[in-house]
Image: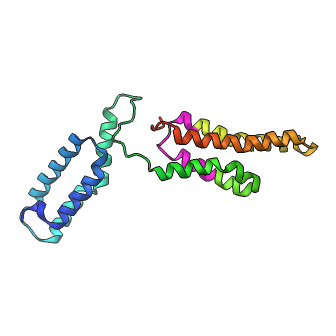
Amino acid sequence: MNGTEHPLVTAYLAAFTEEADVLPASRRDELIADLREHLDLAVKDTTDEKTVRAALEQLGSPDVIVAAALAEEDAGAPHGAAPRATDRPQTRSRTVITAVLIGVTGLAGLSGSLVGGIALLCGLILLWTSAQWQRGTKLLVTALALATPGVLALGAATGVLSKGTTPMQLLVLMTAGIVLPAVAAVRLLRAPEGRAR
């Protein structure tokens, strides 16, 4: 058995191949060939598990190697270049969860400010910690989601709401509170993918 046939090496290379799926095929193949060559020399024909583990630890974990390769590629890309199609896409479930949390903030706010506030906060955290949407989309969605709570807070702070609101003003506020977050949610679901720069 040569070095690359050892079960630990096989598992390591399989994990690396899975992690390296985000790299261009030529770069991924080059790295796999380099790893195989290095491990074949480092491990040779040994079956000693300690020797194999030491060689694998010296290389580092597959995700670290892939991250370094991605960083090298990013460093070589022109400033402001469009994100590569090979970047790992955000999962659809996170996209939907973020959109739903933002979208229901209006309805949840009507049922109780705490529920609406928590949904809004969670939705905004998911939005801003994601690489799924471009900065402009994030700003627009944030503005739409915060518009009604902002108007309500401003009205409460200035005393306008305490003087009494007409049924028409209340209807406009409620409609805006439901429609604006829903529009923001639809925008998130339809927005083109792209890293915030």
Residue farthest to the right?
163
Most foreground residue, 38 or 131: 131
Mainly helix, strand or loop, the magenta region? helix
Q: Is residue 111 visible?
A: yes
Q: Position of residue 163 (x, y in %)?
A: 93, 43
Q: Is residue 12 left or right of residue 180?
A: left
Disc tally is: 0
Q: Residue at x 50, y 36 (%)?
A: 134
Q: Residue at x 55, y 45 (%)?
A: 127
Q: Is residue 159 visible?
A: no
Task: Name which quarter of the figure residue 55 lies in.
Answer: bottom left
Q: Quadrant of the N terminus?
A: bottom left
Most foreground residue, 67 or 17: 17
Q: Position of residue 69 (x, y in %)?
A: 28, 44
Q: Is residue 50 left or right of residue 125?
A: left
Instruction: Specify how the rendered protein is coloured.
Output: rainbow
Q: Is residue 178 magenta?
A: no
Q: Is residue 133 magenta?
A: yes
Q: Residue at x 29, y 48 (%)?
A: 21
User: In the rendered image of this protein, does residue 182 appear above or below residue 122?
Assistant: above
Q: Position of residue 65 (x, y in %)?
A: 28, 50
Most foreground residue, 72 or 174: 174
Q: Which residues are magenta?
A: 121-138
Q: Position of residue 187 (x, y in %)?
A: 57, 38
